[in-house]
Image (spheres, grey):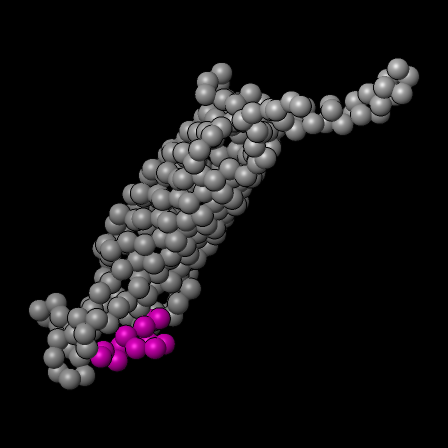
Amino acid sequence: MLKRLLFILVLFPFFNLDSKAQRNVNDSSIFMPLVSIDYTAMFPAGDFGKRFGFTNGLGLSVDFKTKKKWIYGLHGNFLFSGQVKDVSQFEQIINSDGTVTAISGGLAGISLKMRGFNVNGDIGYLFTFKKPNPNSGLFIKGGLGYLQHKIYIQNVEEDVPQFNGEYKKGYDRLSMGLSIHQHIGYQYINGKGIWNFHAGLYFMEGLTQNIRYNFDTKSKSDKLQFDFLFGIKVGWTIPIYKRTPDKIYYN
C-alpha cells in the first residue's frame, strides 16, 4: 500500500503536466504558430493611385498567437498590376500615333505593368467569443514595414534600345520607403480538418521616394510620394500545434 502511494505521489506532477498538454483548440486558448498563404485585392489612392490601378497582393504570413490572445507576426506580399496610368516619362520616345519604333523600323510591342513588394511586422489582439472556440474570433493588427514598387517594362516583340539593359531603369520610376498598415478581420481555427482561414479589411500607407535618375526629366526626384492601398485580404491558414487524440484507451 505504501509503495503504491509513493508511486502515485511521484507520478502526480507528470499526470498534471499531461492534462495541461491535452488541452485543445476547442476548449482552451493555446499558443500556436499560424502560417498563411494570402491574397489581397487592393484599390490604390494618393500618389500610388495616380500612377497605377487595381493591385493584387500575393503573400505569405507567419503569426504567433499567445495563450493570452496577443498576435505577433511577419508578413510579405508580392504586388502586381496590369494598369499603369501615368506614362508621361515615355512621351519623348512615343510616336505621334502612340507607338514606339524599333531598330528594324517596325512598331515595337511594349507592355507596361506594375511590380513591387512589401514586408512588415505587426502586433495585434484576438477577441474571442464562446463560439466556435477560444482560438477563433475578431482580430485587429497594426505594424511597420517597407514598400517598393516600379513600372515593369516588357519589350514584347521588337528590340527597342531605350528599354534595353540599364536604360530601362531610367523610365521605371523605382520607388521605395517606409510603410504602416492596419488589418481588421476574422480568424477561424478549426479543431479538426484543414479549413482554417482569415478574412478582413487591409489598409497600407507608404511614404516612398523615386530613387532613379529619370531620363525624361534629366534629374533625380526628391519628392516624397504618399502611397495608399486598401482592400480585402483573405488567407488559408495552417495552425501548428499538438493535437489531442480523439479517443483514450484504457487497459
Rendering quarter of residue 203 = top left
The answer to whether 188 appears left or right of 41 in the picture is: right
Residue 203 visible in this rendered orientation of the protein: no
Q: Is residue 158 above or below residue 68?
A: below
Rendering quarter of residue 107 = bottom left
Q: Is residue 169 magenta?
A: yes
Judged by its main secondary structure, the magenta piece is helix
Q: Residue at x 46, y 18 (%)?
A: 131
The magenta-colored residue range is 159-170
Q: Residue at x 13, y 83 (%)?
A: 105
Rendering quarter of residue 113 = bottom left
The answer to whether 97 appears left or right of 219 in the picture is: left
Q: How many marks?
A: 0
The answer to whether 129 appears left or right of 214 in the picture is: right
Q: Residue furthest left?
A: 97
Q: Is residue 219 above or below residue 121?
A: below
Residue 43 picture location, percent across and down: 29, 43
Q: Quadrant of the C terminus?
A: top right
Q: Residue at x 37, y 39 (%)?
A: 233
Residue 166 picture location, percent across and down: 36, 76
Residue 240 visible in this rendered orientation of the protein: yes
Residue 96 picture location, percent across and down: 10, 70
Residue 1 picture location, percent across and down: 88, 15
